[in-house]
Image: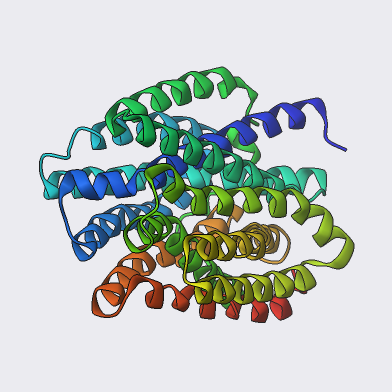
Amino acid sequence: MLTEVQKRARLAVTATFITNGLVVGAFVARIPDIKKALDVSNSTLSLCLLASSLGVFAALPVAGKLCAKYGSSPVAFYATLAMVVAWTLQSFTFFAVWAFALTAFFAGYTLATQDVAMNSHAVTLEHQSSLRLMSVFHGMFSVGGFSGGILGGLASQIGISYRVQTIIICAAITIIALQVRMLWLPGSDDSHELEPGTKMHRPAIIWLFGIFGLCSTIGEGAVGDWGGVLTRETYGASPFVSAIPYVVFSATMIIGRFSGDRLATRFGAAKVLASGGLIASIGMFSGLLLNSTAGTIFGWFWMGTGLSVAIPLLFSAAGSMASNKFAGQMAPAQAVAMVSGISYFGFIVGPPFIGFVSDATTLRTALFIPALLALAIVASARFAKSA
């Protein structure tokens, strides 16, 4: 059972996961419009997306160290405010590709810092309460992504600019962050700074969790960044319809993640991970073979269902191992950051790689790659048993 203090902290973490997803969903839904505003090819757009992903990757080790030193709560709060500034600035940079790429880097950096902090706080709550909570928290991220996708699709359809959309969303996020600031657990609850001169241990199994997470994030990044472009440019879908694959993907992520903690408690994390990998791969392959807007929606539906449980269970396992098996060698926040760093490399290499392959072949052909990689998640089941 959660104490009253823990319940308040759960509310703060929930709100932060939602805002993190909201920013991502609203951005992804407008990628076709951003591509048009910048007037660039798929390859150039890929480089812009790469800049954002590089920002994510650069932030992860720094965020882990900050959370270990000061605790996750202050890092989460200030990272949220920095994220608001960075994403707002990004919406003013369509005048030049280099300017957009530069602000995209800082937007990704702040988003990732917030991400590590909120996941670290979630691990602390799980450890203190002995309850599985991570999957539901990630479900809240998907609620944000789903909402952002709908808002972005509607805004695009009725002609609201990405800039106005971003300013409104960032203003709302600022209000939420200020409202929940006092609900977090104190930073001292999960600060685990190592003694001076002590070298952080990096267990092989944490590396493995990151690699399996990498296979999942390549899929998440690909379906998020390229679903709208595929339906609009290949199948001639309208702006609103082109946002539907990502919205469907986010919706199934919500359902799967809200069920993930319960399923993992009942059947074990290993079985849930193995089943998810198979569902994602088979569903994505089937949808792409249908070669239509409806097929894309079908494939994105099952991809979201299958991938929904992968990252939450892997993050939870890494944080749990750091707390229980590697105490004094690695802080939970650093374990989460390490798995995040490896996993989120999928967001760096995935979307650009899909873009380059699509220019050499077709976008539809390139999207068979994440469908194949989803099978690797099945292998993670064996190692999750020890978490």
Residue 75 point in image, percent of width and height: 47, 37
Percent coordinates x, y for residue 355 in the rendering: 29, 68
- Name the residue at 20% across, 50% down: 101
The answer to whether any part of residue 127 appears in the image is: yes
Residue 9 image offset from top left, x and y in percent = 68, 31
Q: Residue at x 25, y 34 (%)?
A: 91
Q: Residue 252: horizontal and vertical position, in percent?
A: 65, 53
What colouring method underlies this structural image?
rainbow
Quarter the C terminus occupies: bottom right
Q: How many marks?
A: 0
Q: Is 70 located above or below residue 35 in the figure?
A: above
Q: Quadrant of the N terminus?
A: top right
Observer able to see residue 83: no
Q: Is 338 positioned to the left or the right of 46 in the image?
A: right
Q: Nearer the viewer, residue 39 or 171?
A: 39
Q: Residue at x 45, y 78 (%)?
A: 369
Query: Is residue 146 or residue 186 the one in the foreground?
Result: 146
Q: Please tell me in which quadrant of the rendered image residue 23 appears.
A: top left
In depth, the one of 52 and 364 nearer the eye is 364
Residue name at image x 53 percent, y 73 percent: 290
Q: Along the line of sight, which residue is nearer the eye, 105 or 255? A: 255
